[in-house]
């Protein structure tokens, strides 16, 4: 640089001085940029902050959601067992009744008269028995003294036996008359909720046939009868036999959750009672029955519900929030954050839904970080800064649960 300055001073030329300063400025720019920098290159953007969850492998029960209907645990038809005019209704429709509580009163006058007549016949038979016994006792010593013939004594003893039979028949007639008189008061055979009355006062009931008067149903607890395709049952059993799945504990105590027709979850858990031993030939379905407490009477007989139950469990499965999984026609995928902050798209195999989470069967390794929130911030190949995801700040995506048998088929 000093040599160039000496040359310029010596020349005294204005054009030479301009050339000198231009070359010097260019040299200073090249030195400032350095060998690794390009002129005009923008600075790298900072990492994008995303919410992530760290996946862990665990044993997860596969939930199956099956359609079903509710049914009263006990049903009793209140019927008239004797004929007569219905005089009185003794209950309020839709109320709770106790076992043995009087519900209807049938005209009891004919049956009271029949009871009095039977009692009179029984009393006459008892009097005849006393006379026959006395005569037989008198004839016995006379026979020993040969004062009467053997035939007379046998006739006296036979008369005594016949009188005893008449007394027994009279007692049976009295008992039958008492039963019919009791049937005039119609009572509830079980405790439960009674519906509307099927007859009104003044109607003739029980004439020629047993007339139904009302219906009493016990709705606490309530039964839930659900159906499952036999093909799903066979696939599920095959997956369990091959070791892909395992049974979810004792079926007799398996927990069942009831989903109401409006999509809400019934607050009390149900209990699986049994699975039917036969297949419905018309539909190819197997019936399962669950029992659910119903202390407030929220469930009514005949309601359409859905039952979520765990029939199998899968080992080494992973649970992800539903919004972490992208679903499209090509399949299911998630975004995984690597240790260097790079983001990769990973294809996964999703089974069923469990508690607003997807059960991931394949595609992830324990310890990997999956993005749950912040997808919209990622542009191009931007790096991510993972932070723990806060579920309170995000609303869960709607679930479309698959059956456990379908998950087993995918496995």
Image (spheres, rainbow, N blue to C red):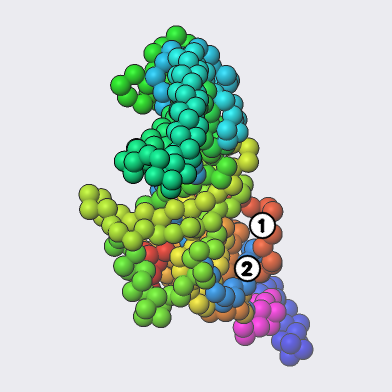
The spot of residue 176 in percent (x, y) is 44, 30
Q: Quadrant of the N terminus?
A: bottom right
Name which residue lies at 48% across and 57% down: 273
Prevailing secondary structure class for the magenta stretch in the rendered image: helix
Disc 1 crowd rating (10 Å Cα; few below 14, some 14-19, many 20+) is few
Does residue 70 show up? Answer: no
Name which residue lies at 53% across and 28% down: 187
The spot of residue 378 in percent (x, y) is 57, 62
Does the magenta portion include 298? Answer: no
**Circle 1/circle 2 CB separation < 8 Å:** no
Q: Quadrant of the C terminus?
A: bottom left
Q: Nearer the viewer, residue 156 or 59?
A: 156
**Kind of element beneath mark 1:** helix
Q: Residue furthest top?
A: 202
Looking at the rendered structure, the number of numbered marks drawn on it comes to 2
Location of mark 2 (residue): 53
Q: Quadrant of residue 45?
A: bottom right
Name which residue lies at 41% across and 27% down: 81
The spot of residue 381 in percent (x, y) is 53, 69
Relative to 247, is 48 above or below?
above
Disc 2 crowd rating (10 Å Cα; few below 14, some 14-19, many 20+) is many
Q: What is the distance, in whole Å, between disc 1 and disc 2 at their CAs?
A: 10 Å
Location of mark 1 (residue): 391
Does the magenta portion include 34? Answer: yes
Q: Quadrant of residue 205?
A: top left
Q: Nearer the viewer, residue 70 or 405?
A: 70
Chain part drawn in magenta: 24-36
Does residue 219 show up? Answer: yes
Query: Is tag 1's residue or tag 2's residue first in the polypeptide sequence?
Result: 2
The spot of residue 27 in percent (x, y) is 66, 81
Q: Nearer the viewer, residue 218 or 272?
A: 218
Name which residue lies at 30% across and 21% down: 208
């Amino acid at each position: 640089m000093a040599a160039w300055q000496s040359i310029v001073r010596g020349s005294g030329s204005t054009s030479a001085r301009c050339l000198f300063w231009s070359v010097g400025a260019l040299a200073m720019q090249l030195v400032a940029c350095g060998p690794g920098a390009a002129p005009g290159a923008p600075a790298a953007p900072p990492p994008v902050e995303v919410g992530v969850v760290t996946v862990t492998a665990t044993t997860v029960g596969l939930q199956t959601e099956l359609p079903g209907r509710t049914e009263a645990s006990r049903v009793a038809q209140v019927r008239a067992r004797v004929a007569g005019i219905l005089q009185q209704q003794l209950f309020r429709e839709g109320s709770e009744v106790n076992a043995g509580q009087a519900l209807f009163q049938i005209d009891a006058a004919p049956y009271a008269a029949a009871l009095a007549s039977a009692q009179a016949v029984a009393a006459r038979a008892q009097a005849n028995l006393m006379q026959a016994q006395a005569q037989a006792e008198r004839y016995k010593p006379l026979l020993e003294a040969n004062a009467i013939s053997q035939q007379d004594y046998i006739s006296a003893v036979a008369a005594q036996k016949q009188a005893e039979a008449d007394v027994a028949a009279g007692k049976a007639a009295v008992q039958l008359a008492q039963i019919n008189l009791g049937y005039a008061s119609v009572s509830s055979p079980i405790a439960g909720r009674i519906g509307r009355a099927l007859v009104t006062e003044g109607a003739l009931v029980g004439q020629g046939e047993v007339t139904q008067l009302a219906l009493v149903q016990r709705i606490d607890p309530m039964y839930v009868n659900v159906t499952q395709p036999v093909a799903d049952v066979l696939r599920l059993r095959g997956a369990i036999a091959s070791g892909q799945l395992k049974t979810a504990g004792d079926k007799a105590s398996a927990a069942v959750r009831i989903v109401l027709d409006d999509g809400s979850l019934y607050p009390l858990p149900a209990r699986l009672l049994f699975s039917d031993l036969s297949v419905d030939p018309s539909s190819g379905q197997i019936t399962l029955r669950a029992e659910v407490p119903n202390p407030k009477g929220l469930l009514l007989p005949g309601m359409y519900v859905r039952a979520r139950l765990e029939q199998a469990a899968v080992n080494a499965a992973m649970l992800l929030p539903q919004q972490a999984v992208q679903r499209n026609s090509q399949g299911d995928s998630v975004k995984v954050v690597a240790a260097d902050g790079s983001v990769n798209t990973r294809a996964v195999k999703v089974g069923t839904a469990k508690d607003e989470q997807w059960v991931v069967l394949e595609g992830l390794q324990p310890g990997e970080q999956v993005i749950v929130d912040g997808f919209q911030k990622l542009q191009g190949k931007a790096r991510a800064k993972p932070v723990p995801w806060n579920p309170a700040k995000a609303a869960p995506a709607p679930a479309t649960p698959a059956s456990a048998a379908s998950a087993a088929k995918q496995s």
